[in-house]
Image: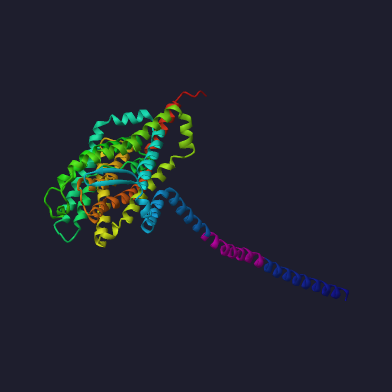
Amino acid sequence: MDSSLGSKIRDTISVTSVLNGSSQHQQGQGGNEDEDLEPILRGNTEDAHASPRSSLRTLHKWLSAVKGLIVDQWFLVGLGCLILISSQVQVSQSQQEVGLEIISNDHGSHTLQRKEVVVTYFCVALIFIITGCTLPTGVLIQNYQRWKLHLLVQSQCFLMTSAVSFVVVSICATNPTFMDAGLLVGIIFTGCVPTTISSNVVMTEQAHGNQPLTVVQSTLGNFLGPFLTPLLVLMYTSTGAWYTEILPQSGASDLKELYRRTFKQLGLSLFLPMFVGQVIQNLFPKATKKVFKDWKLKKLSSFSLLIIVWQTFDQAFATGAFSSVKADNMIFLVFISIAFYILWTIVCVFLSRFWLDKKDTIAVAYCVPAKTPAMGVPLTSVMFAGLPAITASKIQIPMVIFQGLQIAAGSLMTVVFRRWIRAEEKENLEDDTCEDHPAGSISS
């Protein structure tokens, strides 16, 4: 009996242990399932939080890219804003008519406006004082001695561009109803005037080109302009074509007035400031470097250039020049001006790459296709005295439009040229480093 009782007790204990073990196993499995679910739930929560974070990072990248573009191309943005402002608000007529100098001639008088004096003399002079303070004198003299390059650049700037303009005008003139006669004459003027100065100097520096060469070519072109531009214009407008019938008798005897005004402007706003800047640079080299490079006051050149462009468009809108042209003619002018600039740039870059380095090529690429209305606009009234105001405005419109487009294109080209020349600048920097620390000069 005792044995039977003992066996029953053992059976009860074994059943109890089995039940306890099964219960613990189920609890363990349940715990493991909870542990397995935890990372899944945590992962879904993290994904839910990560989605807006990634969107914010993407938005931040886009905003940074836009900010970088605006900072790099602030000049182009400012140019667009100023043109928009000048189209809506112009300097009052009372201020436009306040004159500081009156030049008398047989056909009346010319009043030099206060705004014109500030822009034509002060802003340009400021650009060339800064240029004179930052350009080494030896490099400037060295570039003046490159006479073969002068022949190449100036022949393209005057002969090639004027010939292309005349060909386009001749094609357009086959249909007398297609283009206004004044605009066709204005396209000829655009091709015949010399290169601009201020924007060339500023843009070449921004593109890391040979700025001294640009200064030399620009000043040389504007020195030759008063002599070559009238001859080219007279040659192309003496063909007897129907669009030349709007032009009165040429006032060739009044060209001496153009010479006097042009060389006075070149002397006071270019050569004299450049000379003063060179003197300051050689007398105070450390102070000059600190002011213009460390303090970055060279940016004043770009601001001065914006004021020059604003003055041109302000005057064009104030005189109602744009409103006198048909819309289809204006669209054609914009596209043909872009085509001119691209074609002239491609030709001069292609020819320059045969024997010039990249820095010189960049300088040539800014000098050849650029045109200055500063000489073309007064030339219209000097060469053809008695032009009606509306006709004179139409002749000047192609030059004004081309100036705005060439500055916009030149600003965009600075990005392309900087990337193009970056490898060469890196090689030159490495060569200079090797010269400063030749192999074997450092002992172990």
| Residue 270 versus residue 32 in the image, above or below | above
> In the shown orientation, is residue 229 left or right of residue 134?
left
| Residue 51 versus residue 359 in the image, above or below | below
Q: Residue at x 75, y 71 (%)?
A: 18
Task: Give, as a single range, the part of the protein colored magenta.
Answer: 32-55
Q: Position of residue 365 (x, y in %)?
A: 29, 42
**Quadrant housing residue 364:** top left
Q: Nearer the viewer, residue 195 or 45?
A: 195
Q: Position of residue 350 (x, y in %)?
A: 25, 42
Q: Position of residue 325 (x, y in %)?
A: 25, 59
| Residue 10 versus residue 441 in the image, above or below | below
Q: Nearer the viewer, residue 51 or 307?
A: 307
Q: Does the magenta run of residues contain 202?
A: no
Q: Position of residue 74 (x, y in %)?
A: 42, 49
Asked if residue 420 can be seen in this view, the reply is no
Q: Does the magenta run of residues contain 38?
A: yes
